[in-house]
Amino acid sequence: MNEDEIAVFIQLWTSVNSYVSVKDKESACEHFLAIINEHVTDLEETASDWAGFDSSIDKVLRNNYIDHDGLDEDDEEDNW
C-alpha cells in the first residue's frame, strides 16, 4: 500500500472523526481500522506506515496491531 492510498484512508477517518463523540472515538477508530485490516492491508505488517497522522489511530495501532517486543501482561507481573 503506497502513501497516497494511506492518505485517502486517513482523510476519510479525519472527515468522519469530527462527527464521533469523544466517548465513542476509540471504539469507532478500532472498527474503522479493523475493516481496513480485514479488507485492505495487514496492519500488523504496515502499522508504522499509518502512524503519526492521528492520535486515535496511533492509540488503536499501539493497542491492537503493534507487537510490543513479545511482552505480555504475565511477563510484566513476573518481574515484580
Image: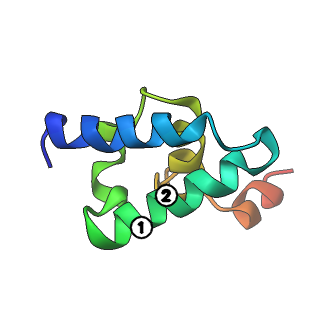
Mark 1: amino acid:
Ile
Asked if residue 12 lies left or right of residue 55, the reply is left
**Residue appearing at x 57%, y 30% in the figure:** 55
Q: Tell me where residue 77 appears, x and y as whole percent.
A: 82, 58
Q: Residues within 10 Å of mark 2 (few under 14, many from 20)?
A: some
Identify residue for label 1.
35
How many numbered discs, if any? Answer: 2
Left or right, residue 31 beside residue 25: left
Q: Is there CB contact under 8 Å for labels 2 and 1? A: yes
User: Image quadrant of residue 59?
Assistant: top right
Q: Residues within 10 Å of mark 1 (few under 14, many from 20)?
A: few
Instruction: From the viewer's perspective, tell me whether residue 59 is left or right of residue 49.
Output: right
* Whole-number angstrom distance, CA of label 2 to CA of label 1: 5 Å
Q: Secondary structure at mark 2?
A: helix
Q: Is residue 65 above or below residue 59?
A: below
Residue situated in front as seen by the camera: 37 or 13: 13
Residue 14: which disc?
Answer: none
Spot occupied by residue 4 in the image (x, y as percentages of width and height): 15, 35
- Badge number at residue 32: 2
